[in-house]
Image (tube, rainbow, N blue to C red):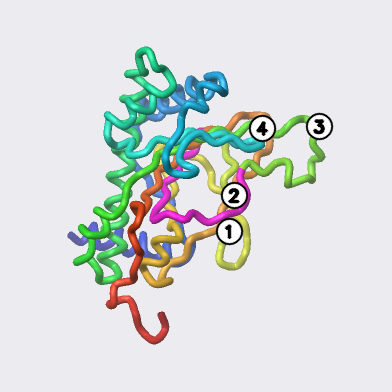
Amino acid sequence: SSKWDEVTADVLKALEDYGCFEASFDKLSVELNRSVFEAMEDLFELPIPTKQRNVSSKPFHGYLCHNLYESLGINDANVLEKVNDFTQQLWPDHGNKSISETIHLFSEQLVELDLMVRRMIMESFGIENYIDEHLNSTYYLTRLMKYTSPPDDDDDDDEETKLGLRSHTDKNIITILHQYQVDGLEVKTKDDKWIKVKPSQDSVLVMVGDSLCALLNGRLHSPYHRVIMTGKKTRYSTGLFSIPKTGVIIDSPEELVDKEH
């Protein structure tokens, strides 16, 4: 439809310019946001040995803790059974039905957005014939993240101590980030300026990862981003990552290979 084409053009322009865009997403209701936020507070209040039971056979997929940053990971959280497995790790006796349902619903909504964006991108580059094959070659990881505010006695100008997460690009296909109330996320532009991303309850940041750059033969770039913690508030955020399945080789379709690329 013409609306779809219009939005696709806007999405592509933003991704070409910045490698990311803010998407207003009405499926994230106030109630759902509140439930996810409360679920994260409950989860991160658990004792460290309990959180360490969030393990995965894949590296960097389970519980992580480093300086100001702490994170729990759930594979395929758009499948209720998988979220139940996660809450069962933390509450072996009875799991946690309401937290499972909240995380599942939230992940399901973000997956819908991820699929829409990937479809738009592939149509834009004339490789829609590969959509099904591409979608079947990926899986999802939902991350719940907590950033603690830096200690009071830190030197105000010392950026190192305020780093919640160092500058990096994401290795996956697409990342969808949602910040709760407290900002801190910054994205680097092509001309090396850091721009702050303001949190908004009904919008998310959709970002290109390195694997998507490879698939598109460098036609989009994955932006560097980081988290800087200032102020006294704890920061919570969520991320949905679409990731190539183990053993998948990312190959640019021949349609995207030319003299320049």
Query: Residue 184 location in percent, x, y?
Result: 60, 42
The residue nearer to you, when weighing 11 against 45, is 45
Identify the residue at horizontal 54%, vertical 20% (top origin).
45
The answer to whether the residue labelled 2 contacts the one labelled 3, judged by CB atoms less than 8 Å apart, is: no
Mark 3 nearby-residue class (10 Å; few <14, some 14–19, many ≥20): few
Q: Nearer the viewer, residue 161 or 202?
A: 161
Can you tell which quarter of the image residue 161 is in? Answer: top right
Q: Is 37 placed above or below 78 here?
A: above
Q: Looking at the image, which is closer to me, 248 or 177?
A: 248
Mark earlier in primary sequence (1, 4): 4
Indicate which label's residue lies in the foreground, 2 or 1: 2
As helix, strand or loop, the secondary structure at mark 3 comes to loop
Neighbour class for label 2 at 10 Å: few (<14), some, many (≥20)? some
Q: Secondary structure at mark 4?
A: loop
* Label number found at residue 73: none
The kind of residue on which mark 4 rests is Ser
Q: Which one is earlier in the sequence, the residue at label 2 or at label 1? A: 1
Does residue 196 appear anywhere in the picture?
Answer: yes
Find numbered disc 1 in the image and state the secondary structure of the residue it sits on: strand
Label 1 sits on residue: 188
Q: Which mark is residue 149?
A: 4
Q: Amino acid at mark 3?
A: Asp
